[in-house]
Amino acid sequence: MLGAAYTLKHDSHVRVDIFYQKASPLTRAWTNLLGTLLLLFPTCVFILISSLDYVATSWSIQEGSRETGGLDGVFLLKTVIPLMAVLLLLQGCSLALRSALVIAGRGPAEAGAGIADKDL
């Protein structure tokens, strides 16, 4: 879960590539911007909001595994859920800003096609 933002940063996430690969950098930038604003951000906000009580309850009882010999720190593992949402939101902001720069004609065209190491 902690690798999701890293995967998005390096444009290695799963994408249904119907038109994206052959699209122009401007079209890719628009696709990235709209996908980030309309899909990524709402999903991350939903995950963040819905997981806060779940994680808070787990922390309040210092939840451990119900199984004999199971993990003691289940509450620590559950903390990764909202952390993943926050990291994806931050990386999504970066992607949206880079895409907006490409759309405005002020960023490198490659940034509209995803985020490569050379753009960093």
Image (spheres, rainbow, N blue to C red):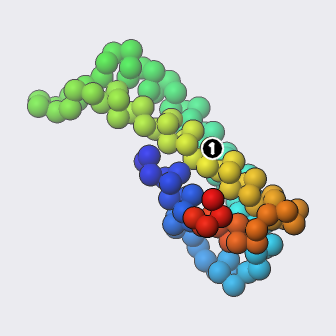
Report which residue position mark 1 lands on. Answer: 90
Taking the image as shown, residue 30 lies to the left or right of residue 74, namely right
Q: Amino acid at mark 1?
A: Leu
- Residue at the image position 46 percent from the left and 38 percent from the top: 81
The residue most toward the left is: 69
Taking the image as shown, residue 110 lies to the left or right of residue 64, namely right
Q: Nearer the viewer, residue 106 or 7?
A: 106
Q: Using the image, determine if residue 74 lies above or below residue 10.
A: above
Pinpoint residue 103: horizontal percent, then vertical percent: 84, 65
Pinpoint residue 82: horizontal percent, then vertical percent: 51, 35
Can residue 38 be seen here?
Answer: no
Can residue 10 be seen here?
Answer: yes
Pinpoint residue 12: horizontal percent, then vertical percent: 51, 66
| Disc 1 crowd, CA 10 A, few/some/many (<14, 14-19, 20+) | some
- Residue at the image position 56 percent from the left and 35 percent from the top: 48
For residue 111, what is the image quadrant? bottom right
Taking the image as shown, residue 25 lies to the left or right of residue 7, namely right
Q: Nearer the viewer, residue 89 or 18?
A: 89
Pinpoint residue 59: horizontal percent, then vertical percent: 38, 20
- Residue at the image position 33 percent from the left and 15 percent from the top: 61
The residue most toward the top is: 60
Q: Using the image, determine if residue 88 lies above or below residue 16.
A: above
For residue 75, what is the image quadrant? top left
Q: Quadrant of the C terminus?
A: bottom right
Q: Using the image, determine if residue 15 lies above or below residue 38.
A: below
Disc 1 secondary structure class: helix
